[in-house]
Amino acid sequence: MKIIQFYKNETQLIKKAANQHRDAQHQLYNQYAPKMLSVCRQYIRDIHFAEEVMLGGFLKVFQNLSNFKFEGSFEGWIRRIMVNESISFLRKEKQIFFTEEITGYTEESWNNINTELEVEQIQELIDSLPEGYRMVFVLYAVEGYKHSEIAKTLGISESTSKSQLFKARKLLQQKLNQQNKISNGAIEI
Amino acid sequence: MAPLKFEEKIKEKLEQRAIEPSMGSWEKLSGQLDQVQNQKKGNKMIWWYSLAAVFVGVLILTSLFYNPVSEDVNPQFVDRTKENTEQKDTEIVQENKEEPPQIIEKENVVIDIQKSKDEVVDVSESNTKLIKKGNEGFSKVTPDSAPSKDIDEQPKEVTEIAQTNEETVDLIEQKQKQEISINREIIDNKVADIVAKVEELQKNNTEVTDEEINALLRKAQRDITTQKILKSNTVSASALLQDVEEEIDETFKQRVFEALKAGFQKVKTAVAEREN
């Protein structure tokens, strides 16, 4: 009953916000802004820029709210807008290079790596990746995009998307190995 | 551990994460929203104004083409003035045309002159009739042709103006009657003189040439006109009055036109507002 009521309330809230009711918009903002800032932060290293991008995304959300047909989840719709906003921000800010080399890859190398990481550690790892790798990795691993969708979104070929993901994974593996070695060494000391 | 499992863990943790935005972020966003909304409103207003202007323009054009009231109003004024001027011109031409037969016939000179005298009277009468007609036309037209909601106000002005016009017409009639009586006296005297001269010429000379008679008649006409001017001050006064009347008529016309236009436009805007 509570879930149904929540959805009813949310649809009413969305309709009100679409009619430019400021209070409804404020409520939606309070509800989704923290999650959306987290989404933007995955792509943009600087939190201030990430917030700017998020505000721009919400501006678009409230301007185009009448186009939302209540067919999918509202959060997913906002999330997609935020991802697109983040990518276009990165494109404006700097040139992104995508390399297409694919070298040998072995799954066994992940076996001895400790993947129990905190969110901050994960974010640090993602931030350490080059721009092109990071975008493809986040889109694939976190947002669940397929390579065809990534290629379309970033304007690259599917093979480039695959190579970027491969390199991102390899780099992450190396960094996790280094972290493990450091932590093991620290424990031993 | 496979990379997919590692990625799943990353996904879970990142999806659960929430970063609180800075304190003034909502105010910033609402400011941006207000700005965008104002711009949209401005654009919408421009569109609405342009649409309304086009609608009003189309209404005016259609009403001008299809409204019988506007068709009735304009030609009445134009036609009256034209009639006045044309009739005056034609009568003057007729007078000039009728002069030659008076001169050619020797024996019927007196009769012709008397006829011309009567014609002068007729002309003056016809002028008075025309003036009457013109003013009646204005007084008749204006109350019928005021279709606006100012019907209560406008006829008062119109009737007042019509009354003043009637008064001026009466004055002109009186003065014209005086003129006619003076003219009659002058013409009678002149006719008597000419008849006497013709008789003298017939007595003295057995043959009276056409040239002599023509000369006498021309002289008589000149004398009549000069005496008219000298004796009656009403000639200049009536002319002045006619001029003034023409001016009054013009302003009267303009007033009526303006009143009609204003009323008409009010009705149109009221209809447009109702429809909007």
Image: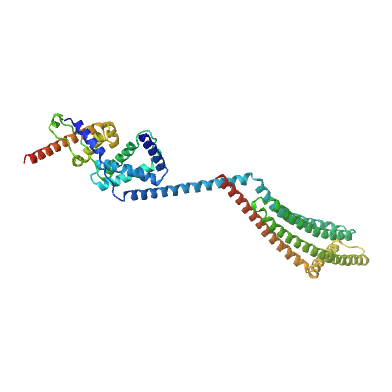
Residue A154 found in image quarter: top left
Q: Is residue B50 above or below residue B111?
A: above
Residue B195 found in image quarter: bottom right
Quarter of the picture containing the C terminus of chain B is top right
Q: How is the image coloured?
A: rainbow
Q: Residue furthest front?
A: A1
Instruction: Residue at 67% x, 52% y: name it.
Output: B146
Q: Is residue B112 above or below residue A166?
A: below
Q: Is residue B218 visible?
A: no
Q: Is residue B162 above or below residue A186?
A: below
Q: What x and y, as percent, mark residue A116?
A: 17, 36
Instruction: Give the camera-side residue of B208 and B265.
Output: B265
Instruction: Give the camera-side residue of B99 and B138.
Output: B138
Q: What x and y, as percent, mark residue B98?
A: 82, 56
Count of residue discs:
0
Quarter of the picture containing the N terminus of chain B is top left
Instruction: Give the camera-side residue of B197 and B12.
Output: B12
Q: What x and y, as percent, mark residue B127?
A: 78, 58
Instruction: Give the camera-side residue of A30 and B222.
Output: A30
Q: Is residue B229 visible?
A: yes
Q: What x and y, as percent, mark residue B113?
A: 86, 60
Residue B212 found in image quarter: bottom right
Q: Residue furthest left?
A: A189
Left/right placement of residue A67 relative to residue B196 reads left
Left/right placement of residue B131 relative to residue B152 reads right
Left/right placement of residue A26 relative to residue B257 reads left
Q: Residue furthest right?
A: B203
